[in-house]
Image (cartoon, rainbow, N blue to C red):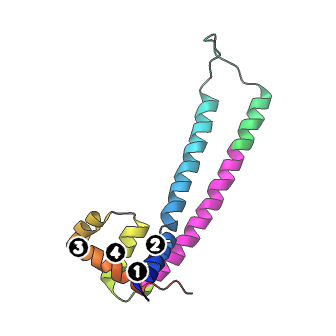
Amino acid sequence: MDKEQIKVENNRKKKYLRGYKWHSRRIDRIEAEIEEIRSMKFNPSFKADGMPAGSEPSDLSKYAAELDELERELYEEGIKQVKVYKDISYRIRELTDEGEQDVMFYRYIKGLDFWEIANKMDCTERWVHKLHGRALKNLNLAK
């Protein structure tokens, strides 16, 4: 493989590995939406005249439907996240070098920066980058 092909392959692997954190962020966003909807329902809104506005029955059914939809999305996203976690962690455990496994776990499951990984592993950031490169090379996505 030439350098450009290696770069393309590594980017493909990184995108795959970032999938777990992507699901985490999506779950956080859905939870924030649920919290916002609940907050709006329990805190009275105000009309332009400054007087509190009452809730109508139609408001309650719309609120319940939105909340139900978001809770269903949250559940489904959680299932997807678990599946992605299992697959990524399986592939990381397939790496034969424990240092490579550590770097990939801390980077793509825990979401740590390279300097944080270096601190955790008690080594230099340069060594972490080297392990990361080797791990990307050895990571098998073919299955």
Camera-side residue: 54 or 13? 13
Q: Is residue 80 magenta?
A: yes
Given the current orientation, which residue lies at the most extreme right position?
Answer: 58
Q: Please name the amino acid that badge 3 sits on.
A: Arg
Q: Mark 1 — residue?
A: 136
- Tell me the distance, in whole angstroms, between the alpha carbons under discs 2 and 4: 13 Å
- Element under disc 4: helix
Earlier residue among tags 4 and 3: 4
Residue 92: horizontal and vertical position, in percent? 43, 80
Q: Quadrant of the N terminus?
A: bottom left
- Tell me the distance, in whole angstroms, between the alpha carbons under discs 2 and 1: 8 Å
Q: Which mark is residue 42?
A: none
- Tell me the distance, in whole angstroms, between the alpha carbons under discs 2 and 3: 19 Å
Q: Mark 4 — residue?
A: 103
Camera-side residue: 99 or 129? 129
Q: Which mark is residue 126?
A: 3
Classify 10 Å Cα crowding around label 1: few (below 14), some (14-19), many (20 and above): many
Q: Quadrant of the C terminus?
A: bottom right
- Element under disc 2: helix
Earlier residue among tags 2 and 4: 2
Are the residues at dot 2 and dot 1 in contact (C-beta closer than 8 Å)? yes
Q: Residue at the location (43% across, 80% down)?
A: 4
Residue 27: horizontal and vertical position, in percent? 55, 55
Q: Which residues are magenta?
A: 67-93
Earlier residue among tags 2 and 3: 2
Q: Please name the amino acid that badge 1 sits on.
A: Leu
Q: Residue at the location (58% across, 33% down)?
A: 39
- Tell me the distance, in whole angstroms, between the alpha carbons under discs 1 and 3: 15 Å
Q: Please name the amino acid that badge 4 sits on.
A: Val
Q: Residue at the location (59% across, 49% down)?
A: 30
Q: Mark 2 — residue?
A: 14
